[in-house]
Image: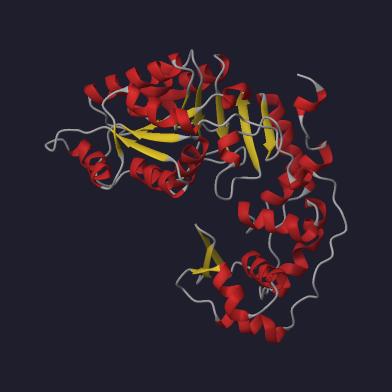
Amino acid sequence: MNEKEKGIRLSDEQRLNWLRLIRSENVGPATFRDLIAHCGSASNAIQMLPELVRRGGRGKPIRIASMDDAERELRAAAKMGVCFTGIGEPDYPHYLRQSDNPPPLVAIKGNPDVFRLPPVAIVGARNASLVGIKFARMIARELGEAGFATISGLARGIDTAAHEASLQYGTVAAMAGGLDHPYPPENLGLYKAIPEQGGAVVSEMPLGWEPRARDFPRRNRIIAALSLGLVVVEAAERSGSLISARLAGELGRLVFAVPGSPLDPRAKGTNELLKNGAIVTTGTDDIISALTPLIERPTLEDSAFLAPASELTSPASPDETERDRLFSLLGPVPVDVDDIIRTSELHPSAVMLILLELDLAGRLQRHSGGHVSLAYV
């Protein structure tokens, strides 16, 4: 790999500050992006957080991750062979970068070259039928033979079958907790085998984080975002696989569903997906023929996040009248940020700054599609 192909990488200081910023209270991927845009760098953003929170109307300060905490996490990661990769760096997963509000840093253990293969997610029921397991293994193996990587969530049932069948070709497991807390425990051997055989395990969560029920939908978002298309093999009427399918659709990914017997509750979700426009999938060719025209060649795109910090010319800070005007337009129903800009008649930069302040203060909730609402806690 020549110097040009290596692309731009975070410096050690940048990586440390990025980790501090994303681990700070009320800072998610969208907030991180807006902070970098407004402040110029993560280090500047960390310094400005207290004032931004105060202007957002929060009476007490937020928790800002300390330098010691970030250094401790980086040391623990290095001991495990885990790298924190920033968006815009060459090893950052290509399709994840193209998604809505991708995590600025992801923890990766394994071979990042797997992200250069066209990725297909395969998900389904934990209590999968024998037929479902055999079908998941078949398509994962055949996709691997055709040069695709398999993405899944290391769960029991369909996920396990897909990972096992694609180990030798390239597979990626997205985790709901930190990479030092693999789940479920019975898949610990598979968790270890994936990076050993050329695949990767990934997470946006901190090391030491034990997965909770509410973390799995976030994990499902990563599965969908990592993929070019998502295949649901079996899914009950209410299941995490259907959440993954919905998120994939929102991201513009193709959704495939395997039809099943109306008498099997594990087919109720997949059959419903088919009624709503998912691609009927009875063999691997259905997936390959639909996805092949969509495959992009990963490119090393310079990221504004990685550029050296510069002095930004920001508009004057909005006054209280302008803040009150914007706040009055918000409520519990999500509204489009562009509509807020048009209706408020404020400068777009002023609107984004006020929303950022409210977000950091814990008073704003972000939704897909660039919508926001007030957060009532």
Q: Which of 118 and 238 is in front in this view?
A: 118
Determine the residue positioned at 74% across, 55% down: 36
Q: Quadrant of residue 138?
A: top left
Identity of the residue drawn at 31% across and 44% down: 239
- The residue at the far bottom in this view is 321
**Horizontal placement of 203 versus 306: left or right?**
left
Instruction: Left or right? Give the position of 191 relative to 315.
Output: left
Along the line of sight, the residue nearer the viewer: 101 or 106: 101
Residue 184 in view here: no
Q: Is residue 221 left or right of residue 23?
A: left
Q: x and y percent of residue 173 in the render?
A: 49, 29
**x, y percent for residue 38:** 76, 61
Residue at left offset 66%, top offset 32%: 299
**Position of the N terminus by quadrant:** top right
Determine which quarter of the picture holds residue 311. bottom right
Up-down relation of residue 322 to residue 22 (above or below): below
User: Furthest residue to the left?
Assistant: 263
Q: Is residue 36 left or right of residue 192?
A: right
The coloring applied to the image is secondary structure
Vertical position of residue 81 compared to residue 62: above or below:
above
Count numbered badges in the picture. 0
Q: In this view, does 41 lie above or below 271?
A: below
Q: Is residue 216 visible?
A: yes
Percent position of residue 280, x then y:
27, 34
**Residue beneath the point at 60% across and 33% down:** 93
Across and down, in percent, residue 152 comes to: 44, 31
Residue placed farthest to the right in the image? Answer: 311
